[in-house]
Image: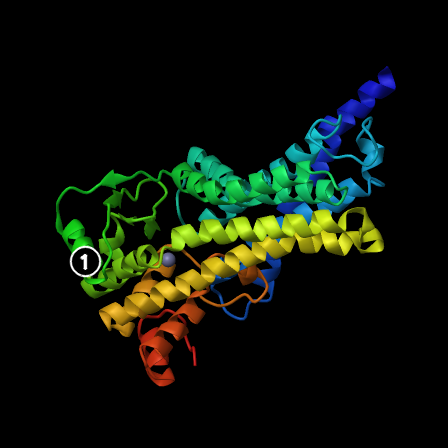
Amino acid sequence: MLIEFGARLLHWAALPAVLLATPSLLSIFAFVAARTHATNDQPRAQWIEYRSWDRIIQIMLLVVWWLLWDFRGPLSIVIPFNGAKDSTTLFDSGAPAFWYLPVSAIFLYLVVSSYLGTAILRRKRGIGLRISHAIGRIVSFAAPLILLEAGIDELLKRNAWGFLYFAGAAAAWRIGAIVALFAVGFRLNSLKSGETLGRARRIAHQMGVKLRHVFMVPAGRGRLTNAYSMGDAIAVTDSLGQHLTRDQLEFTIAHEVAHCQRKHGRTTVRSGLLIFGVSAAVLFAIGPQAGPMRIPLQILGLLTPVAAAEWISRRNEYEADRVAVEFTKEPESAIRALGNLSCAADAPMRPNPIADVFEGHPCLLYRVRAIAHAGRLSQERLSDILREAQIIEAES
Ligand SMILES: [Zn+2]
């Protein structure tokens, strides 16, 4: 009885503490390392650079956790597993830990890095906003990954429940992004009149798109500065005018209208269903025959659909940029618009070849290069604009 109680206490206290420490230490360590090896004193740029590893840190944590769970060696000391040895369904005893431990670890990591980030960027943020921001990001990234992990485990056992987890992951992927936006104060006000509505309607009309709605999003507590497209509607934050000139605004709206014109919302959903569906079917077909290939298969099965879905999203961004520049015929304004938006969002400017695989937007440098190419700007001119706009210093 006492031993059982002790084991439970360990289960509920010691292990979470160990796990929670990992990502926080990781983030502090990486931050300190980035600062020590700095050749210049630009903590802001270094922080943004470090933040570009954010999703990789989460993926690593989730993969390590998953493998530990599957090969319960070290965990069996602290977690009393009473359930069937090779089962990880939601209904097993001990199984809730499969969900709440990594989620709470990532939650702590996100909150800690939010505090570090605002200290470095000299921003102020309330605790409520930090928490909702972290929750939004978990719902849109970590949660779909954990669902995929559970699904892969089931599919490799030829358990059809795995398909349900995959469907859940695909849905969370899509809905999570929307939840993440609303968590940081995203609100939609349909425009009935005004300059922005007039401009959006004119651009849409000229691009052959019928917009059902044009929304204004209050920048609010989340300090949003962005534009969005949803089906046959677009949304812009009311803070855009502070960061963009008229020509830059023209490109930004044309980019969103281009998403509507090319029906990117619909293709994202369809390709997502296809990618997640095919991955699940392949894993189910392989099933227990995976043998010694199980671990590589698990990791591949987790990362491939995620990378493929984000690749499609990046391809859509390049296409929307190209269509918008073909419309405005102002590649220079387009480059400056993207530079200003990246700056306002503290987004990384330079590529991160590993982390960018899991990002839905291409890095700024690749986007402006593609725009320069589409708009027939020379490499020298591009370098000049970037230097002038202080987007990427000494880029050549
Ligand atoms: Zn876009």
Residue 197, image x, y percentages: 17, 49
> Residue 203 vs residue 87: left or right?
left
Mark 1 Cα within 10 Å, few/some/many (few <14, many 20+)?
few
Q: Answer yes or no: disc 1 within 8 Å of ligand 1.
A: no
- Up the image or down, 57 lies above or below 1; here it is below
Q: Residue at x 69, y 30 (%)?
A: 90
Residue 274, image x, y percentages: 55, 52
Residue 31 showing in the rendered view: no
- Up the image or down, 282 lies above or below 190; here it is below
Residue nearest the viewer, comparing 14 with 359: 359
Q: Residue at x 21, y 65 (%)?
A: 247
Q: Residue at x 26, y 61 (%)?
A: 254
Residue nearest the viewer, comparing 302 with 226: 302
Q: In the image, ligand 1 is in what quadrant?
A: bottom left
- Up the image or down, 210 lies above or below 332; here it is above
Q: Quadrant of the N terminus?
A: top right
> Residue 95 vs residue 137: left or right?
right
Q: Label 1 belongs to which residue?
A: 205
> Residue 192 vs residue 95: left or right?
left
Residue nearest the viewer, comparing 35 with 284: 284
Residue 200, image x, y percentages: 20, 54
Residue nearest the viewer, comparing 296 with 211: 211
Residue 393 showing in the rendered view: yes
Residue type, mark 1 in image: His
